Amino acid sequence: MIRISIVALFCAMALSGCAAYQRDAVGDQENLLSAAGFTVLPATTQDRQTMLAELPPNRLSQRIEGEHVSYLYPDLVLCRCLYVGSQAAFGRYQQIMVQRQIAGAQLQAARLNTDFAWDWGVWGGYRGLYY
């Protein structure tokens, strides 16, 4: 009986951690969309909530009406709202994402290059083989 309680406790902790991670990820995504110029439309009516639930959750999708292209991001976790962006807003969003990837790569390279404690002498001076 105690084992079941302990397992249930660990499962509950894991699920709460997953939920917190999802909220953080959605919040981060919404910040990016807002910065790119997406508009927030709250799902204040039953019809809006129904349509919101039909979209792929927490994922950008595209809707085309004639020559007009809209990008939609439904948030079913935090605000129960719809982020709507134009082609221009989507282009800015893509630029932000590329800049973020570049910044991440630069940060990783900086971390790799700042390990001053590394001592090639321990490895018999193998550093010379690659330079």
Image (cartoon, helix red, strand yellow):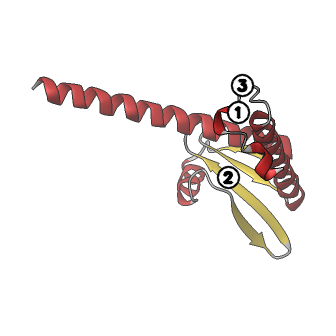
* Lower position in the chain sequence, tag 2 or tag 1: 2
The residue identified by callout 2 is 73
Q: Nearer the viewer, mark 2 or mark 1?
A: 1
Residue 59, placed above or below residue 67: above
Which mark, by number, is residue 86?
none
Number of callouts in the render?
A: 3
Looking at the picture, how far across and down is residue 67, in whole percent?
86, 74
Residue 108: image quadrant is top right
Q: Amino acid at mark 3?
A: Ala
Residue 37: in sight, yes or no? no
Which mark, by number, is residue 121?
1
Residue 100, placed above or below residue 117: below
Identified at 68% across, 57% down, the residue is 60
Q: Amino acid at mark 2?
A: Tyr
Separation (CA) of disc 2 from disc 1:
54 Å
Q: Residues within 10 Å of mark 3 (few under 14, many from 20)?
A: few
The residue identified by callout 3 is 117
